[in-house]
Structure formats: C-alpha cells, structure tokens
C-alpha cells in the first residue's frame, strides 16, 4: 500500500512520486500540463467524409482531431459538437475524439449516451446498490469495484451528484475549446490508493482540485508547500539488481522489451530469472511502461518453471493501479504482459 505522494509541478509538467509504507518509491509518473487525455471539448467540424461518417474537427484553436459520427447524423461543416478525447495522438497519429462522454470517478463512471446501469465484475453484492440505482435510473452509470471497501454508500451518491453537475456545466458551455480538463495519471492513481494517504504538492491548482475530494476519497492529509524540492530521481534504461543481474529496458513504439543479463552469476538460468522478477516489476512501475511489455528471460526453462514465473508476476501486479494482464510465455519464449495506457 502507498503511504505518501509528492506531486511536484513546474511550468510544463507535474511529477508524481508515490512511496509505499517502507518509504520506498513505488511509482513515478509524469503528466504534461497540456495533455487532455479524456478531456471534454466544444469542437467545430471542418470537414465530413460522408462515405464512412468520418469527420475532422478543431477541438482547440490550432488543434485538429478526427471523430466517427453515427449513421444518419444531421451534422455539417461548421457544426459545433461536445466530444471527449479518447486518444491523444502520439507517434504522428491524429487525436481521436468521441461524442459519447464518460466522466470517471473513484466509485462510478457516468455515461452520457446511455441510461442503463452496469456493475464491475469484481463488485461484491451489487444488490446493495439497488436503492441508488433506482434513484438515478435516468443516468447511465458503471459502478466500480472500489465500492467494495465502503460501508457508507452515501459517498457513492455524492460522487454521482458531483459528476452529474459537471455534465450539466458542460452542456452550458458556448465557447470553443476545452470545457473540462482531462484526468492526469495522479488522479487515476488516487482512485486506487487514496485511503489514508498523505499528499503534498507545490501547486495551488492541484491542491484546489484535490481539496474537494479529501472526504470523498478518504485522503488522510493534503498539504500545500510551495517550497518543496523535486525529488532527485534518475531513471536509466539499464538497471542492476541487488544480485548483480542487469536489466536492459528498451522502449519502442507501443512495445517495451526488458532483457535479462545474468552477468557472471553462477546460478542456474531459472534461479536468475526468478531473482530478477521483483526488480522487473519495480522497473515497469517506475518507468510507467504501458501497452505491450515483453520480458526476455534467459531461455532453457521447463514449462513448470515458466508457469511459476508467470504466477509470481501476476501476484506482484495484483495491486497495480493500471489494469494489466499477464498472458504468459509466447512460442518465442518471451513473457508477454499487457498494461493499460
């Protein structure tokens, strides 16, 4: 579990340093202050390709994105639409937006395009939400598994009202551009680990944004300190474990490869691989690797040994704030992991 988070902001980025109960750095996240992932915009359509219902739009003064329009739409060039960023467009790809607005909270996700209610697969006894579900039957909702930790469901209702008020405010906007900021990584981290946390930041904007969530999310302490120094963290693409095992981290476009070098170790290949796993998972979290992650373990292991390695990785990722899936070993002998972006 995490015990302390430092969020340091400069003119361009915010840097999140998340420490566990042993005061060890567990997560290091960087958010661009200009990033609008999941942000909501009042945009203007500039060109519609009728053949496939694809449209180009200006979602900010000098920024262009694409959107898929529903069949039978009545929109035309110059039309204004409210839309949400679904992909910020990296590696030369154009940003993608959607007319379906999803406002995420710690306990629920509000859906603008639907009026139905859904429940997370890992949500226990969702029948206890029947009363709230009936009360807000005209609002599309997804109830998240974080509700499992609650004894007072009034908090869930409070978050529904908060998200609903944001949706109403969005509908009243008339000026083109961003009408609701996107969700930075540190907020999604807090969705997972807010209870009992001590949070300190040097940013008035971040402090004000979190202040309203202290009781809602169970944050233990939130403080503003404009004089805090940015922790000196230097991440290299080559990491050496306490056992002398070298990990080479290669970041490619959408694919990350971690290669293991045993060096002069006299241990068996399986023992080297097993000893390296804790540090591999640690480096994945610190480098915030996402998408496809391939681990190139030292080869010549039995199927049973591969299974033990996979099970240990799954266990270490159980409490990860990003959604992940350990797929196991490919035919080429690489261990494949999918970690959500």
Image (cartoon, rainbow, N blue to C red):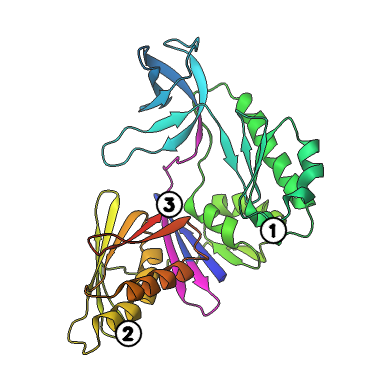
Nearest the eye: 161 or 112: 112
Q: Residue furthest front?
A: 303
Mark closer to the chain start, 3 or 2: 2
- Determine whether the residue tagged by mark 3 lies in a helix, strand or loop: loop
Q: To which residue does mark 3 refer?
A: 340
Q: To which residue does mark 2 refer?
A: 242
Specify whether 280 is left or right of 101.
Answer: left
Q: To which residue does mark 1 refer?
A: 148
* Mark 3 to mark 1 CA distance (whole Å): 22 Å
Mark closer to the chain start, 2 or 1: 1
On the question of residue 92 being in view, the answer is: yes
Viewer-nearest of discs 2 and 1:
1
Q: Quadrant of residue 194?
A: bottom right
- Mark 3 is surrounded, within 10 Å at the Cα level, by few (under 14), some (14 to 19) or many (20 or more) other residues, namely few
Residue 63 falls within the magenta-colored stretch: no
Q: Is residue 225 above or below residue 270?
A: above
- The structure residue drawn at horizontal position 64% and vertical position 32%, both measured from the top left corner, is 167
- The structure residue drawn at horizontal position 61% and vertical position 67%, both measured from the top left corner, is 197
Q: Residue 115: x, y in percent? A: 67, 30
- Mark 1 is surrounded, within 10 Å at the Cα level, by few (under 14), some (14 to 19) or many (20 or more) other residues, namely few
Question: Which quadrant would the N terminus be assigned to in this image?
Answer: bottom right
Q: Residue 198: x, y in percent? A: 61, 68
Specify whether 97 is left or right of 133.
Answer: left
């Amino acid at each position: 579990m995490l015990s302390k988070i430092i969020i340091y902001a400069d003119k361009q980025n915010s840097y999140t340093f998340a420490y566990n109960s042993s005061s060890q750095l567990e997560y290091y996240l960087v958010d661009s202050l200009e990033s609008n992932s999941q942000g909501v915009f009042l945009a203007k359509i500039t060109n519609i390709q009728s053949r496939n219902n694809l449209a180009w739009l200006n979602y900010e003064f000098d920024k262009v994105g694409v959107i898929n329009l529903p069949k039978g739409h009545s929109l035309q060039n110059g039309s204004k639409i409210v839309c949400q960023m679904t992909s910020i467009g990296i590696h030369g790809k154009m940003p993608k937006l959607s007319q379906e607005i999803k406002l995420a909270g710690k306990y629920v996700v509000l859906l603008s395009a639907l009026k139905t209610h859904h429940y997370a697969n890992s949500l226990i006894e969702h029948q206890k939400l029947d009363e709230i579900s009936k009360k807000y039957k005209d609002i599309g909702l997804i109830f998240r598994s974080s509700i499992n930790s609650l004894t007072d469901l009034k908090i869930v209702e409070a978050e529904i009202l908060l998200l609903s008020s944001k949706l109403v405010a969005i509908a009243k906007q008339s000026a083109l551009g961003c009408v609701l900021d996107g969700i930075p990584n540190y907020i999604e981290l807090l969705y997972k680990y807010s209870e009992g946390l001590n949070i300190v930041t040097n940013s008035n904007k971040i402090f004000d944004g979190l202040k309203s969530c202290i009781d809602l999310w169970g944050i233990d302490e939130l403080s503003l300190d404009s004089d805090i120094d940015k922790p000196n963290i230097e991440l290299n693409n080559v990491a050496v474990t306490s056992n002398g095992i070298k990990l080479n981290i290669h970041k490619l476009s959408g694919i990350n490869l971690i290669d293991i070098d045993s060096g002069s170790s006299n241990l068996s290949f399986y023992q080297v691989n097993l000893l390296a796993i804790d540090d591999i998972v640690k480096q994945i979290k610190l480098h915030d690797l996402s998408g496809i992650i391939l681990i190139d373990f030292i080869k010549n292991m039995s199927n049973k040994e591969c299974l033990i390695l996979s099970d240990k990785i799954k266990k270490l990722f159980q409490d990860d704030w990003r959604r992940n899936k350990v797929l196991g070993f490919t035919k080429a002998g690489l261990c494949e992991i999918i970690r959500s972006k």
